[in-house]
Image (cartoon, rainbow, N blue to C red):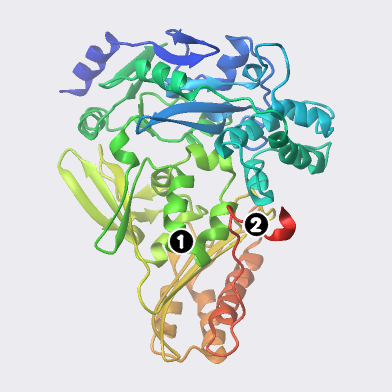
Amino acid sequence: MAVNQWENAEATMSQPIRFYFRGAVQEVSRALPTQTVLQHLRGNLHCTGTKEGCAEGDCGACMVVIGSLRHGKVELKAVNSCIQLLPTLDGKALFSVADLQRADGGLHPVQQAMVDCHGSQCGFCTPGFVMSLWSLYLNLDGRQPRRRQINDALSGNLCRCTGYRPIIEAAQRMGQLPPVELDRDSLALQLLSLRREKMATYSACGQQFHAPRSLDELVQVCAALPHACLLAGGTDVGLWVTKQMRELGDVIYLGQVDALKNISDADGMLEIGAGVSLNDAYEAVCAHYPDALMELWQRFASLPIRNVGTLGGNLANGSPIGDSIPWLIAIGADVVLRGSEGQRVLALDDFYLAYQKKDLRPGEFLEAVRVPLPRAGQVLRTYKLAKRFDQDISAVCAAFAFTLDDGMVTSARVVFGGMAAIPKRAERTEAGLIGRPWSESTVTAAMADIGRDYAPLSDLRASSAYRMKAAQNLLRRFWFETRPNAPLPAYAVNVFASRPEEN
């Protein structure tokens, strides 16, 4: 179908946005497709308990919980409503802080715990903290949270008043109060009634939002609208709207294509669909690379961002400071691309051509990433340098994947983010390492080679000199942790476990 025929046909078939909210199905027909969930909550539904702080997914004041069906079961996740576009709610359930009050007017255990532990002062950030804790409460199924789980749940919330201690105490106390259950069975039936079998198109104010349900529909609409904006989690595109005030034009939403959310393991490769959330993707990969990737998983943005952001979106974005790209290049990952002419597979390090330029043909989209599983003798480490531990963008992100045999370097892949216009391998450094003994003198020579591989820029995160020195020292740190004699232990954080003293 020609582009203009497609646009004319779809414009006459606009379907309302339907979602479940406060015991009823809401239908929206006239809102801008780029209106955010937060704007609709406050301006149209008059639920002003949810606050706007940063409008970029950093502070957590706008936190809500989204419910969706996955394999017939309800998934409930905390997300930042300030960067979620309203049409992405279609077929889902929305919960705000206004939903927590009990039928008898009493407080929910999360709210009561915040009162008991003096977890609120000015109160502006409090609704967001409550929603993050409510999401944790729901997903614990009555179990007491560990300290690391609490820290991770609150990683997307900022507070200037309390110092966090009383909020953490509230998280520990909420499970000790009489429980309040959510009727998931009834919610599942509501969501099932909202499920669409075919692609939905929402049109308003001259803009269109297409939400295909299958890969075939996605291929068709991408071919018809090759210049449309592809939207996955919205953690970057949302900022185009709220901060850059950009007009998106036609939008193709990938979040309803279930085929993009599969993870499979075959022939030594872990294939992760482009629609798999960052949190689920890292959980799957960390099962195979726990020492190398566990800390990076925890430090990647915040839990609400990882709940909606996708690994495919992170790769397709191609940011030179994206934390997933260096280690995926280091272990030799491939991307699966799909368009009207079929599938093609490309090495990830061949995908990036220049700053914000990728080997992606018109109408083509990223379908999956293939992650090699660990090989005998392979050593992988990743390191992230940023000004904060949680929820910060890297100044430098490094990944080293070596094969060592009897003290010799038989293969080496050295990749840095933040050092060039694209995540880039240090090819001179790699060539100087292969075939050499894994020794301090070899590492010292390789550190000098890094200076010939990169010419980093200075920006608000770090100076050029800092980036270069940090990159060189990270290679030395890698050697300290993997040297044949007396290696130092690698530091890894398990987001689901905790030491006894943390309980």
Q: Mark 1 points at which residue?
A: 326
Q: Residues within 10 Å of mark 1 (few under 14, many from 20)?
A: many
- Which quadrant would residue 116 be assigned to in this image? top right
Q: Is residue 500 above or below residue 242?
A: below
Q: How crowded is mark 2: few (under 14 residues within 10 Å), some or many (20 or more)?
A: some
Secondary structure category for the residue under label 2: loop
Choose mark 1 or mark 2, whichever is in front. 2
Q: Earlier in the sequence, mark 1 or mark 2?
A: 1
Q: Where is residue 245 in the image (x, y as percent from the top left)?
A: 54, 26
Question: Could you tell me which residue is drawn at 34 percent across and 40 percent down?
Answer: 261
Residue situated in front as seen by the camera: 468 or 131? 131
Question: Could you tell me which residue is drawn at 39 percent across and 18 percent down?
Answer: 189
Question: Could you tell me which residue is drawn at 25 percent across and 37 percent down?
Answer: 363
Q: Position of residue 472 (x, y in %)?
A: 58, 75
Q: Is residue 417 visible?
A: no
Q: As drawn, is 451 to the left or to the right of 227?
A: right
Locate the N terminus by quadrant: top left
Q: As drawn, is 22 to the left or to the right of 220?
A: right
- Which quadrant would residue 332 be assigned to in this image? bottom left
Question: Could you tell me which residue is drawn at 66 percent across and 43 percent down?
Answer: 144
**Disc 1 residue type (three-letter):** Pro
Asked if the residue at tag 2 contacts the one at tag 1, i.e. Cβ–Cβ closer than 8 Å, the answer is: no
Q: How many labels does the image show?
A: 2
Q: Where is residue 85 in the image (x, y as percent from the top left)?
A: 48, 24
Secondary structure category for the residue under label 1: helix
Q: Name the residue under label 2.
A: 498
Q: Is residue 429 above or below residue 141?
A: below
